[in-house]
Every structure is written in C-alpha cells, then in structure tokens.
Amino acid sequence: MTEKLHDASWRAFASDNYAGAHPEVLAAIAAANGGHQISYGEDAYTARLQHVFAEHFGEGVAVHPVFNGTGANVLALQSMVPRWGAVICAASAHINTDENGAPERVGGLKLLPVPTPDGKLTPELVDREAWGWGEEHRAQPLAVSITQTTELGTCYTPEEVRALADHVHSKGMRLHMDGARLANAGAWLEAPLRAFTRDAGVDLLSFGGTKNGLLFGEAVVVLDHDASDGLGYLRKIDMQLASKMRFLSAQLIAIMTDDLWLRSARRANHMAARLRGQLEQLVAEGSIRGLEFTQPTESNAVFATLPEGAADRLRERFRFYDWDASLGEVRWMCSWDTMEGDVDAFVAAIREVLA
C-alpha cells in the first residue's frame, strides 16, 4: 500500500498550483493507460485533441502539448520571433518576472518590458517600445505577449484584445497570449474561449491546464499558421516533447470536455469573489482595519495591503505569498477545489488578526 505523506484537508491561499488534480482528469489518465500507443504524439489521444480544440477555437488550429507553462511560452515565442527579434510585454508578465530568464537564455529572445498599473497592455503602452525597426543596434520588436488573466488578476475584454491585435498587426508584429489562467478569464467574461483569443486576433496561445485541475501539462495552440514556424523542431530542442504524449493529451481532452475547464474556473473565481465580498463587508462594518484592496477581483486572485506584521501573523495559520513586501501587498489565490468553508475559515483568521 502506498503511504500518504500529506494531510488532504490542508488548504492554502498561496497558489492555484497547490491544488491537486481533478478526479475527472485522473480518470482520463487511467483510461489512457494500458496497452501500447505510438510515442511522441502519434497516438489516438493526441489526434483526438486536435478535434477537441477545434470545437473551442475553430477549424484549422494546431495543438502542441508540452510539460509546463514556461516551456509553452518560450516555445511559442521562439517560433514567432527570429534570433534578432524582441518581445514587448508588461513588466509584471510571468515571462519577465518568474521564468528565470528562460525566454532570453533558452529562447534567445530579448524582452522589452513596459510598466503597467494593472498588468494590462494597451496600444499606447505598446508604442513605448514599438520602435527602432531597421536599426541594427536594437533588437527588433516583432511580437507582443499579453497574459490572460494577468499576473494581477485582471482580465482583458475581447474588445481590448482586438484593439491590441489590430494595433500590433498594423505595425507588422504578432500577438501571443499567455493563457495560464485562460479558463478563469472565460468564466469571468462568460464568453467562449475563441471570443477573446482567435476571434480577437491572437496569433499564438499558451493554453494553461495545471492551474485548473491538470496533473501536469499545457499546450501551444497555433491560431494563425503564418505567425509561427518550426514548432515541430523547437519542441524537441526545448525539451518539451513528451514520449508518452497520450497522457498529456488525455488530460487536455478531459479539461475541454463537458465544460470541465469552465466548471473548475467558475468555482475558483466564485471563491475569490466570496473572499473579497466577506472582507469588504467586514471593512464596511469597521470589524477589521488596515486592509485595502489594490486590484479589482476579476478572476481567482485577490490583491490587498495589510498593516505591518499582519501578513506574518496570518501566515502562521494559512500560507500565502507577499506580492510587494515594501507596500505590504499580498496575493490570495483560490483554486478549483477551494470550498466555502476554506474561505470562511480564512476570513475568520483575517478578522482575528486585523480586529
């Protein structure tokens, strides 16, 4: 019998990566097991995956399963931009702050980060770095990468994505979307996934699964084949080609079937809204002091500032991360498996600390 090494009742608000795999995803892995299937993507599950994603993003898309989000982003951008190219992104973007230089070191790319108040780029912000074409002393801005939802929990509307795509394309650049929490955006917008991706002008998509109930696995989705080249070779070079790819594909099929992606994201978003709503009520009543929200809650993330020392006292009971320690800003994340009781217990602990 396999020994269980953790308490399955323990909950945290640090990251949606803390959550386990959804039972329907685990069942899909088990169903894909047994017997032999051709390796490296020539299996029945990876073939079926192409049709499943076409149902959500339209005919003609190409889906390339990979191991993780950093791999998806590096691979996607590398296929869009030559060695002399640069990628404009928000300063808070995951590719700029949390991937340890992988786009530069592995992808050979130059990032051009732009500060934003809410994690979202606009055409005007893009123009701060969209210049210098033909100048041999400057890396050429050839792509823009946006995150949906952003690292600050905010969400681009389809209209905002379209405005960016039109602006980017008018300058001869391409648009990549880091969709690590794409499902949470769909749940917030109450819109089909293609409405704010392919239909809004996104060229290449990093599709996230791990944060929404997969055991592991993401995908690079080619929405415009003219925007990407060499993915079939780059995936191997970047060490993102799975030999037993059927187990990656089976998970992605499961999350996209029977609206599992939407059901899971809705729960995570709803729990974040519950957390914020209860805290706003306590603030309005004067039951707690010193808590202020710093970003709108449009997904499964709540950003707030706390009085000095409060975060450390609260972390004695619940794990979460500082976002900007100099400001006392913290980030609280909810997951597909966060329950109402988890939120209520966390709120009670916050009330006790900030009473």
Image (spheres, grey):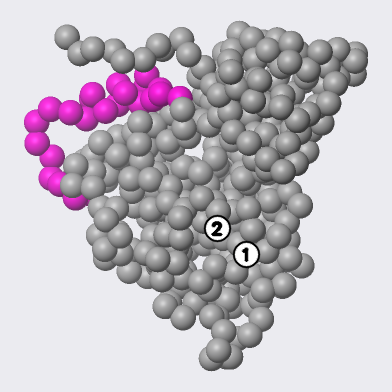
In this rendering, is residue 238 above or below 337? below
**Residue 96 disc label:** 2
Question: Residue 91 at what x, y percent from top left?
Answer: 64, 58
The extreme left residue here reads 35
Identify the element where label 2 is drawn. Answer: helix
- Do the numbered discs 2 and 1 sit on residues whose CB atoms are within 8 Å? yes
**Camera-side residue of 317 and 210:** 317
**Camera-side residue of 299 and 105:** 105
Query: Residue visible at 62% across and 64% down?
Result: 113
In this rendering, is residue 170 above or below 326? below
Question: Residue 251 at what x, y percent from top left?
Answer: 34, 33
| Other residues around mark 1 within 10 Å, as few (<14) / some (14–19) / many (≥20) | many
The extreme front residue here reads 309
The extreme right residue here reads 285
The count of marks equals: 2
Residue 187 belongs to the span the image colors magenta: no
- Residues in magenta, as a range: 19-41
Q: Earlier in the sequence, mark 2 or mark 1?
A: 2
In this rendering, is residue 95 above or below 87? above
Three-letter residue code for mark 1:
Pro
Q: Quadrant of residue 30?
A: top left
Left-right relation of 181 to 290: left
Question: Residue 265 at what x, y percent from top left?
Answer: 56, 29
Query: Residue visible at 35% across and 36% down?
Result: 216
Left-right relation of 82 to 348: left
Query: Residue visible at 57% across and 84% down?
Result: 138
Identify the element where label 1 is drawn. Answer: strand
Q: Quadrant of the N terminus?
A: top left
Query: Residue visible at 68% across and 64% down?
Result: 114
**Residue 113 disc label:** 1
